[in-house]
Amino acid sequence: MAGMSGAQQYPDAVTVDDFRANLAAVRARIDAAAQRVGRDPAQIRLLPVSKTVPADRVRLAIEAGCTMLGENKVQEAKAKAADLADTGVAWSLIGHLQTNKAKDVAAFADEFQALDSLRVARALDRRLQAAGRQLDVLVQVNTSAEEQKYGLAPDEVDTFLRDLAEFETLRVRGLMTLALFTDDTERIRACFRRLRAVRDRVRAEDPALLGPGELSMGMSGDYELAVEEGSTCVRVGQAIFGARATPDAYYWPG
Ligand SMILES: *Cc1c(COP(=O)(O)O)cnc(C)c1O
């Protein structure tokens, strides 16, 4: 990967066939990574991430078979959910949420992967009750210590999960993390291992706290490592849609 620009590495998908080919290629790599470590590939879901991609191009991805899409920002997701309502595609919010956006999320999202505060949980619960809906949630964990802003510290997760149990509208499905942005694969793997260790520790304590115990980890640059380390959901944008011009700092203020 070093030395290759994003545009060379991830060409834009602009036809349904491009999307079919990219989805199949990523899926094949997921399956191969699973097989390398003796895992069942069927236990790993591929969540395509459509952020920055305009709705007309996202529509082609849906035609190619995407049934759920990940988006980082609420406003963008809300607009696309409206534009693409006729397709029936489901939406997973994977980015940090402010409490004043909880109402929007409660209205259209099927999953929220970046829960890391009781304030947000409370706001979501209130809005979901009003809407008569429930939401699948994953708790975001900061597995790279001081280097990222969002997510709970690993040792805060148990208490947080116990507190979440009071919110009947939130169905806890597991944990989510972003690995360090580095070329050092051992440091990336260490992040993924930390998330798995938190899951295993909580499960040993009280399996009811984590539902199915999903591990959402891995993106275009590191999803094969994540699968080798136990991921059950990889969030892949650029390897499916094409390189993104927006700098990562827009999504992950460090
Ligand atoms: C954008 C994003 C991804 C996907 O990143 P790619 O490099 O496009 O694969 C994964 N997770 C989160 C939280 C994101 O915001």
Image (spheres, rainbow, N blue to C red):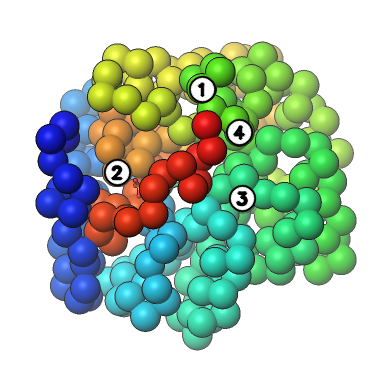
Counting residues from the start of the chain, the first of labels 2 and 4 encountered is 4
Q: Position of residue 35 (x, y in %)?
A: 21, 31
Q: Secondary structure at mark 3?
A: strand
| Mark 4, other Cα within 10 Å: few <14 / some 14–19 / many ≥20 | many
Q: Secondary structure at mark 4?
A: loop
The residue labelled by disc 2 is: 220
Closest to the camera, between mark 2 and mark 4, is: 4
Whole-angstrom CA distance, mark 4 to mark 3, is 14 Å
The residue labelled by disc 4 is: 150
Residue at figure coordinates x 29%, y 43% from the top left:
220
Q: Position of residue 7 (x, y in %)?
A: 18, 54
Quadrant in which residue 73 is drawn: bottom right
Three-letter residue code for mark 4: Tyr
Question: Is residue 56 found left or right of 145 in the rendered image?
Answer: left
Counting residues from the start of the chain, the first of labels 1 and 2 encountered is 1
Whole-angstrom CA distance, mark 4 to mark 1, is 10 Å
Whole-angstrom CA distance, mark 2 to mark 4, is 20 Å
Q: Nearer the viewer, residue 182 or 206?
A: 182
Closest to the camera, between mark 3 and mark 2, is: 2
Q: Secondary structure at mark 1?
A: helix
Q: Is mark 2 within 8 Å of ligand 1?
A: yes
The answer to whether residue 210 shows anywhere in this view is yes
Closest to the camera, between mark 1 and mark 2, is: 1
Circles 3 and 2, Cβ within 8 Å, touching? The answer is: no
The residue labelled by disc 3 is: 112
Q: Is mark 4 within 8 Å of ligand 1?
A: no
Q: Position of residue 178 (x, y in %)?
A: 46, 33
Residue at figure coordinates x 33%, y 75% from the top left:
57
Three-letter residue code for mark 2: Ser
Three-letter residue code for mark 1: Glu
| Mark 2, other Cα within 10 Å: few <14 / some 14–19 / many ≥20 | some
